[in-house]
Image (tube, rainbow, N blue to C red):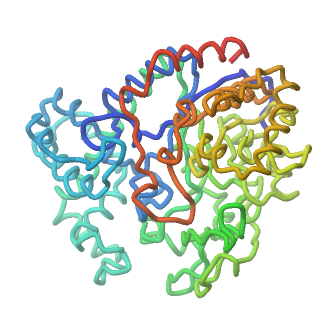
Amino acid sequence: MQTGKKERRAGVLMPVSSLPSDCGIGTLGAGAYAFIDWLHAAGMKIWQVLPLLPTGYGDSPYQSCAADALNPYFIDFATLVQESLLDESDYKSVDWSYDERRVDYGKQFEHKIAILQKAFVRFDKNCVSWKAFLSESKYADYALFMSLKTKFSYAPWTGWVEPYRSADPFALTSYAAEYKDEIEFWQFTQYIFLKQWNALKAYAHERGIAIMGDMPIYVAEDSVEMWKHRQELFMVDGEGNLTLRAGVPPDAFSEDGQLWGNPVYDWTKMQKDGYKWWRARIDYAFTLFDIVRIDHFRAFDRFWGVPMDAETAKDGEWLDGPKAELFEGLGSYGIVAEDLGVLDDGVYALMKTTGYPGMKVFEFAFNGDKDNEYLPTNFVDGNSVAYTGTHDNETLRSFLENMDEGTRKDFETAFEEQCLALDVPYLTETIEDECRSIIELLFASKADTVIVPMHDVLCLGEEARLNAPSTVSNQNWTFRFTCNDFGRRKAAWLQALAQAYDR
């Protein structure tokens, strides 16, 4: 259990993909360093990112092909030019995007890997750190998986021919010997990513910025883990076919619930080795990040399992998870529990036992219930992370603009009461004023940590929404910021709030 008084802090949610760059997607290059400088000028102490995993179905970082791989799209080309691994001509002429505000994942897929392969050809394979990296077999399963994926035209592993589909050890050993260079290329993407990431993280630490990562609870069906380890890790039948899929019951986002489709864990099997795979995954996450938000934390108490023949998530049922047993001895880790959704006594008991801070989302606070736990005045113990909204919510501006007249009137009454109770200016002349008051209200609250998505710092509208759950479109996971978005006035305003409220 976590104990002791925590520092009051504030930070900004900014996906790496949303950073400015000249290659169609945010990278670990100049745009990331400039953002850290902006955070420092703004008095912020946390940069929260979304998962760094390779994106999968619907371009979602929550549908990745591996639980511990790193997204090659985020590798910075300019840094590779400095290391003589690329020439600017290798990438400068590429048309990366139809819109500087949107990631075009199709063009990333088409061009990025081919350019990184040029860098690999020029890379010194006798480098001591590279040989050490290979000797530790780091990301070896991911590299093998991606090499095979390339061989089979990026088809899901279920569409591969035997004996590769069943991951026959003899066949894989033979393949690895024959395609050694191709496999090592995919390891190279991880090696380079880590090199750039560790340099960026060190720079953040020099400026007093901690990095909060994000761990999806599930992996995709088309993943390394399902391909090689489905019998040990997941709910499958004797032939390795899934018997249940992940999702959530009907909620505010969807009347049919959300059928995510991910494999669900066989916690009974995992318990036998002390949840070795999960605990190793958590250990690994803290080599990358200072703080880790674990997505869908409530599933560790009970998870929603949906039969394979069900058409919607409505037909699922609650099944027991590992509960607090999985987290024994991990109380010193800076874990944040995404404890949103359908909550019950079991979830509250899990949160109390682990001591991890949960999330308080402003946009969930105004349902007319004065005991609503997301109202800033109800953050009693302070052990929480307060958000205006999450990556799945509409932007704060959209939240305000989309209210009907009756809801708007009730909201204004309740919002004014909150401002008066916490001695925060109640500004409503413009939407921008209102957004500023809301953010200040969270800064004034007892929550130990406040995180504001960058789109809410700027009071942007629906065009800046990052994801709409249960939908697939070119609007999800694609919004990007430009250099002009990081102005001095916004930084000065946030710095003033941080100072005023001891953050």
39 over 476 or under it: above or below:
above
Q: Position of residue 251 (x, y in %)?
A: 72, 64
Q: Position of residue 278 (x, y in %)?
A: 59, 55
Locate residue 119 relative to residue 309 in the image: left or right.
left
Q: What residue do we see at 58% from left, 22% from top?
A: 45
Locate residue 105 relative to residue 204 in the image: left or right.
left
Q: What residue do we see at 69% from left, 34% from top?
A: 332
Q: Quadrant where the N terminus lies?
A: top right
Q: Nearer the viewer, residue 333 or 38?
A: 38
Q: What residue do we see at 64% from left, 71% from top?
A: 266
Locate residue 28 relative to residue 363 in the image: left or right.
left
The reply to whether residue 161 is visible in this rendering is yes
Locate residue 282 relative to residue 404 in the image: left or right.
left
**Number of numbered tags placed on the structure image:** 0
Q: What residue do we see at 69% from left, 63% from top?
A: 271
Q: Nearer the viewer, residue 476 or 31?
A: 476
Q: Nearer the viewer, residue 88 or 113?
A: 88
Q: Quadrant where the C terminus lies?
A: top right
206 over 143 or under it: above or below:
above
Q: Position of residue 342 (x, y in %)?
A: 77, 60
Q: Position of residue 234 (x, y in %)?
A: 57, 72
The reply to whether residue 381 is visible in this rendering is no
